[in-house]
Amino acid sequence: MHCKVVITLLLAWGSICDAQLDSSNLAAGSATHHMLVRAQSGSGKDQFFLAQAYLSGRGLNQDYSQARSWFKKAADHGHVGAQTELGRMYAEGLGISRDYAQALLWFRRAASEGYAPAQTNLGLMYLEGLGMRADSEAAVNWLEKAAAGGSHLAESDLGFAYFNGFGVNRPDAKRAVRLFRKAAAAEIVEAEFNLGFCYEVGQGVSQDLHEAMLFYSMAAQKSYAPAQNNLGAMYLNARGVPRDVNRAISLFLAAAEAGNSKAFLNLAQTYYSGNGVPRDEVAAYLWLELALGRGESVDESLEIVASRLTTSEIAKAMQQADRWRAQHARVVSTNLGFAFERGQ
């Protein structure tokens, strides 16, 4: 099988932004009751906090339907955080089928009021073409506004746009790195990963594998799958770190648990080649089959591995793949590959 260990080649686009729940409102049952009374009387602020409690399951039993209902009431009172959270629920399909048209409606409403998290999310919708035709220039326009309004996630997303030349005159890796640094200082996980990538490949900054490892590690510690995959590849290939196959496999598996298709490929290659582990062609077929289901072009590799297996071994690998899909059905169905910023 002619393939190499794969790193995630594209930088990470950011997430849709979360409202921060004022936990003092939910410190005791009486406080929750008083908040409910105020919410029922029309207090947009308390409607928002009540919705957040239902959404997070903190202080109240988690109930997406109640969360959406109370966010809608607060949003109708002009609460921009609630408008943003309502848009996020529609965009991410939280307790309801995804509805990008509704998400856009609520993001636009809050963004038009100058609310940075909504502007960030609207920029992401334009970049990804969610519910409309992709428009990189409009995406950058909204992200510039959001970054000026203090959104660190927007800084990270702008860096992504400048690195790839989306919506700007030409790619500018150095400017991208500056934006990533600002966002990484605020612990934005996508920016930490992106800085690691820039240091690993030497774009926008001098190549420095030690720095790459440090930034990948920061993101990996936050369970960010692309960073887990790339850090695993560094350990497998002794790039800037001592070779550690066991740690590499552990990182690949963690990334695979989150549905990262590059980790599937790396596991397949590692087991097929016996790179530091006993050669296991059934396991290689299993991971290639899973990678195929995530859109990777592995038909030729599957044929090569299949030619070395018996019919019963292929059936065994397929059964294992089906079992894995069943156990990870929620990851497979909900992993967007990006997230949205939350309202506050």
Image: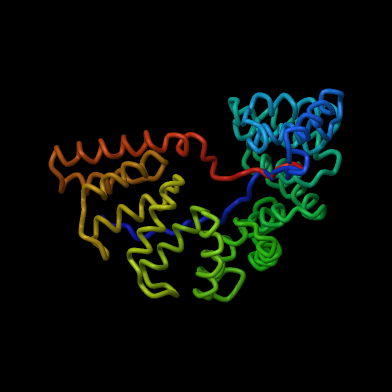
User: Does residue 132 appear in this view?
Assistant: no
Q: How many marks?
A: 0
Q: Position of residue 191 (x, y in %)?
A: 62, 59
Residue at position x 41%, y 49% in the image: 256
- The residue nearer to you, when weighing 54 against 114, is 54
Q: Is residue 290 left or right of residue 336?
A: left
Q: Is residue 243 left or right of residue 83?
A: left
Q: Quadrant of the C terminus?
A: top right
Q: Position of residue 96 (x, y in %)?
A: 60, 25
Q: Quadrant of the N terminus?
A: bottom left
- The residue nearer to you, when weighing 94 against 227, is 94
Q: Quadrant of residue 234?
A: bottom left
Q: Is residue 332 left or right of residue 80?
A: left
Residue at position x 69%, y 29% in the image: 67
How was this image coloured?
Answer: rainbow
Residue at position x 73%, y 50% in the image: 140
From this view, report whether residue 73 is shown above or below residue 149.
above
Q: Quadrant of residue 339?
A: top right
Q: Position of residue 188 (x, y in %)?
A: 65, 57
User: Does residue 135 appear in this view?
Assistant: yes
Q: Position of residue 249 (x, y in %)?
A: 35, 59
